[in-house]
Image: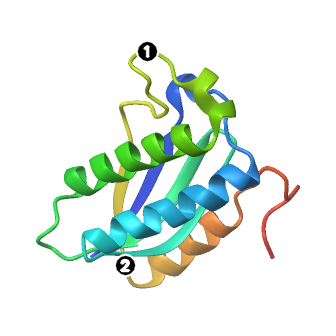
Amino acid sequence: MHVHLVFVTKFRHKVFADRHLTRMEQVMRDVCADFEAELVEFNGENNHVHLVVNFPPKVAVARLVNSLKGVSSRRLRQEFPDLVRHYYRANKLWSGSYFAGSVGGAPLSVVKQYIDQQNRPGQGTARA
């Protein structure tokens, strides 16, 4: 099963630079591996990230999302002290909500292309 996930920062504050997103991608890839899932696509902008994750049906999306957001928030806080000012109320980086939509077949390639075309900070325009 494939799911398109979108996480936004608390209050949509502009938090991320390319270096943050690069590290976050690796952290989220590791979390997915713990769930026997695969991070198929990742990109983001300064206030949100997009992921496409291929995961087994035995995994609850809510559990996967909780781990992705929780672990990434903790790791980024530890590794990038400059982000601490963005952790509002109860030290949360992410908004409590998220988008999750199932994708597959032809729409999967369209979603991957959309994610690849995000205006990642430090890269000016979409990746080639």
Q: In this rendering, would 98 be left or right of 62?
A: right
Counting from the top left corner in percent of width and height, residue 61 is at 23, 57
Residue at 52% across, 24% down: 87
Q: In this rendering, would 39 be left or right of 114?
A: left
Disc 2 to disc 1, how far (Cα)? Answer: 37 Å
Quadrant placement of the N terminus: bottom left
In front here: 89 or 96?
Answer: 89
Can see residue 67? yes
- Please rate how many residues cluster around mark 1, counting C-alpha atoms within 10 Å: few if below 14, some from 14 to 19, many from 20: few
Instruction: Label 2, secondary structure: give it.
Output: loop
In front here: 100 or 110?
Answer: 100
Q: How many marks?
A: 2
**Quarter of image, res 4:** bottom left
Residue at 64% across, 27% down: 13
Mark 2 lies on residue: 104
Residue at 46% across, 83% down: 106
Counting from the top left corner in percent of width and height, residue 78 is at 53, 40
User: Which residue is situated farthest in the bottom direction here?
Assistant: 105
In front here: 18 or 103?
Answer: 18
Image height of 75 relative to 3, above or below: above
Counting from the top left corner in percent of width and height, residue 128 is at 81, 76
Tell me which label, 2 or 1, sits earlier in the chain. Answer: 1
Image height of 77 relative to 51, above or below: above
Can see residue 2? no
**Quarter of image, res 60:** bottom left
Q: Amino acid at mark 1?
A: Arg
Q: Which label lies toward us, 2 or 1?
A: 1
Q: Which mark is residue 89?
A: 1
Instruction: Label 1, secondary structure: give it.
Output: loop
User: Which residue is situated farthest in the top direction here?
Assistant: 89
**Quarter of image, res 115:** bottom right
